[in-house]
Amino acid sequence: MRVFITGASSGLGAQLARCYAAEGATLGLLGRDSARLKALAASLNVPHKIYAADVTDALAVRQAADDFMQAFGTPDLVIANAGISVGTLTEISEDIPVFARVFDTNVMGVVHTLQPFVHAMKDRGSGTLAGISSVAGIRGLPGSGAYSASKAAVTRYLESLRVELRRSGVRVCTVAPGYIETPMTAVNRFPMPFLLSVEKAAARIKKALHKQKSYVTIPWQMGIVSSILKLLPNVLYDALFSRAPHKPRNLIKTSS
């Protein structure tokens, strides 16, 4: 099996790499932290290529994808995992570039990651393109306008791509995790229900991708919560969440 993962320098991406390496998969690992990538790769006794690049750089991601396919062939699975999370407030002008960075990474980064592999997978007639969204994209969370909106956009983008590729043999999977114990959530100063260790989260995501699910919420309890939130009328949702704790501003945490 050949697997290409972004955001592989740390957190969920690194753990997903370990999970697939345990099965002997050939890996393409892309992340911004070259030293961490090298350390991770050194611990994985499988064929691999590492790429120090930012998913906001479409050309760099394209070059990494082309290099991986030239070395190992078309991947069986691509996981667009890279993302950033930070609290934002629309009323603060200094947060405007933060909004832009969050959207560029979380939304365009997914597009940049998946696009280079689409034609090759279609030509072969098989493969899975997966993107890591979030339950935070179900409803807008106060103080997380950029993050919630970006993850909602990721969910809809992947849905569009799934429909476009329906008859091609290429599957598209949207993964919507809740809270996972990673550097991204370590800055949160509020209770995180159904918090999963990164090891458990990666194992459950891998299992869902193996089953070729089109949409999955991790853990299942958060899926129930998100389904209820979808149904709440605005007046009730607003009353319940208007005083919810905010993610800290200016503390950008990444799945690099």
Image (cartoon, rainbow, N blue to C red):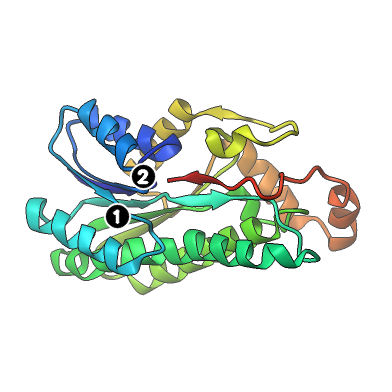
Task: Identify residue type, mark 1.
Answer: Thr
Q: In the orientation shown, which residue stands out farthest toward the left?
A: 71
Q: Quadrant of residue 222?
A: top right
Q: Quadrant of residue 193?
A: top right
Tell me whether circle 2 and circle 1 mark residues in contact (CB < 8 Å).
Answer: yes
How many marks the image carries: the answer is: 2
Say which residue appears at 76% left-offset and 53% top-offset: 143
Q: Which residue is mark 2?
A: 209
Q: Which residue is mark 1?
A: 128
Q: Secondary structure at mark 2?
A: helix
Q: Position of residue 176 (x, y in %)?
A: 53, 48
Closer-to-camera residue (51/206) = 51
Q: Secondary structure at mark 1?
A: strand
Label 1 packing within 10 angstroms: few (<14), some (14-19), many (20+) = many
Q: Residue 23: which numbered mark, if any?
A: none
Left or right of 158? Residue 217 is right
Task: Identify residue type, mark 2.
Answer: Leu
Closer-to-camera residue (78/51) = 51
Say which residue appears at 42% left-offset and 62% top-offset: 109
Above or below residue 25? Residue 86 is: below
